[in-house]
Every structure is written in C-alpha cells, then in structure tokens.
Amino acid sequence: MAESVHARIERLERLLRMQQILIAILLLAIGAIFAYGFSQDSRELTLKSLRFVNEDGKPAALFYGTKEGFEGYVYGRSAEGQDYVPALKLTGDKTGGQIELFDEKGRKVLDFVRGDSGGAIAVYHESGEICASLSAWSDRGSRLELMDTRGRERAFLEADLLGALLKMNIAKGPVVSLYTLLDGGHLALFDEKLDAVVNLPPPK
C-alpha cells in the first residue's frame, strides 16, 4: 500500500529533526577539535579527513578533501536498526555545492544544489523519482515543476525576462497551456484527444 502524504510528511519531519541534532553534535565536535588544536599553540589544523564514530564504533560523520573541493557525510541509523546509512551528504567544488538528505532506508528525499549561475531544490518520492523541483538561474529564469510518482511532468510554471508559461499535463499530453510574452498572451485548453477546444486569442 502506498504511503500516505501525511505519513510521509511526518516521516520527513522526524528525519529533519534527527539531522538537526546530528549537525549540532557534529558542529560541537568540530569546535572542540579546533579549540584543542589552537590551545596547543597551533595556528593551523590540517587534516586529510575527519572521521567521527559513536559509542559502538559505528560511523557518525566523515569529512575529507577531494581533488575539486570536499565531501562529507553525517550518518543515521537505518530502518532495520542495525547498520548506519548516510542521512546527510555535503559536497563542494569551485562551481558551487550540494546538500543531499536521505531517509532511514538510504533513499534520497531532498536535494539542494548551488551552481555558478543559480540553484535548485528537488524533492524525491520514495520510488526515487523527483516529485517536485524549484530552480532559478541567472541565464534561464526560474521554474517550478510537479511530477507524478513515475517522474512524469504534470505541471510546471516558468518565468524569464520575456514572459511566463504555465502548463498542466496528463499522461498523454497537455490539458492547459497559458503563456504571456512582451507582445501579449495565449491560452489553450485541450480535450482527451489532445485537440485544442479553447484557443485564445485564435490563431491568425
């Protein structure tokens, strides 16, 4: 049986609370390391990698440098309660960075991306497909997309310097298309055969 929207929201809230606690612990641990290092009359603390484990020796967090930047993980207990899986992943390079959040089964649920000309946020369904995304780029404008559980686009809203576009789809194709440009706008409604039943203004 498919997981209800309410149950999924509650699970995401629990996951976010757990990750907030993990991040707070991680920041305190990093602060303690820096405080210890500087208390030893050291002006610089250089590490190739930084690894934390819990009382059971299981991974709690791992950070290390890469050729292009850095990569880091914060771990949480898996759904089975035995192993630990990544709950948070951080990456960064010269063009930007990325934050990925995972559920207790290791499935990605949220993704934040920052590039050299903008950024994007993606929300994932339990199937692994993106179900919603929001992006904004200096050279492409902004875009909001909503997808079904199979990753098929159902609706999107897009805006740039020239105008805006709103489109709603069914499995076979569009049912509503609305756009505005500098010289006017256009509205089209389609039937189940994807034939336009309303077309405003009429084609010239």
Image: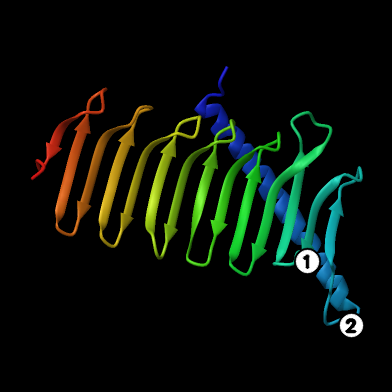
Label 2 crowding class (10 Å Cα cut-off): few <14, some 14-19, many 20+?
Answer: few
> Element under label 2?
loop
Extreme residue toward the top, this view: 1
How many marks the image carries: the answer is 2
Percent position (x, y) of residue 54?
Answer: 87, 47
The amino acid beneath tag 2 is Asp
Nearer to me, 144 or 30? 144
Which quadrant is home to the C terminus? top left
Which residue does the image show at 74% across and 60% down from the upper left? 27
Q: Position of residue 156 (x, y in %)?
A: 36, 43
The structure's colour scheme is rainbow
**Vertical order, 186 against 199 (above or below):** below
Instruction: Work out whether 110 lies above or below 49.
Output: above
Determine which residue is flagged by label 2.
Answer: 41
Mark 1, residue position: 31
Q: Which disc number belongs to residue 42?
A: none
